[in-house]
Amino acid sequence: MTYDIPGQGKLEIHTIILDLNGTLSVGGVVPDGVKERLKTLKDRGFKILFFTGNTRNDADQLAKDLGIEWKLAKNADDKRDLALELEPHTCASIGNGLIDLELMKVVKLRIVTLQDEGIHVQTLLNSDIVIPTITAALDLFIDDQRLIATLRK
């Protein structure tokens, strides 16, 4: 999808990369409303996937339940390298931890969520948008006027 951001120009996002622990799920639980939002975004043509070290060994089941792909990333460099394979200039990432920092440095749009597991300060400082929840973050792409209003100069 292409967004015309006043004062900044065109922003093209095709892929949304999610962190799993602390972002897509909190304490191993996916918040209510996430699955429906992911479906809406996929129906609109976004590629959506999550990168994880699979700490809780639940990535396969969560990916199946949510209808999205996942890739194993055991550290920050793995996340960065996986993003570099996905045309990062058209990617948005949503994360919260230090493991997301290198990923944030290579993608076009960087979003952090302030949920119960917190945000690492270095990742926060390398983000474009701070938003309270994963559902609110996904809503930025569903109601594109929210994204435009947040990014306009």
Image (spheres, grey):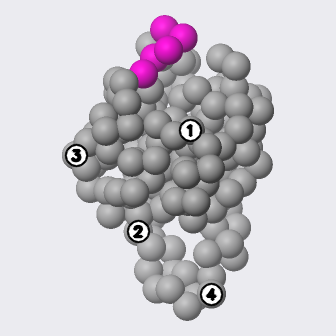
Secondary structure found at label 4: loop
For disc 2, the marked residue is 12
Task: Kindly identify the amino acid type of the residue bearing the numbered disc 2.
Answer: Glu
Decide which of tag 1 and tag 4 comes sooner along the chain. Answer: 1
> Circles 1 and 4: CB distance less than 8 Å?
no
Q: Position of residue 67 (x, y in %)?
A: 49, 26
Q: Residue furthest top?
A: 57
> Circles 2 and 1: CB distance less than 8 Å?
no
Which image quadrant: the C terminus? Answer: bottom right
- Name the front one of labels 2 and 4: 4
Decide which of tag 2 and tag 1 comes sooner along the chain. Answer: 2
Residue 130 higher or lower than 17, as above or below: below
For disc 3, the marked residue is 85
Task: Kindly identify the amino acid type of the residue bearing the numbered disc 4.
Answer: Lys
Task: Kindly identify the amino acid type of the residue bearing the numbered disc 1.
Answer: Gly
Decide which of tag 1 and tag 3 comes sooner along the chain. Answer: 3
Between 82 and 98, the one nearer to me in the picture: 98
For disc 4, the marked residue is 153
Between 48 and 40, the one nearer to me in the picture: 48
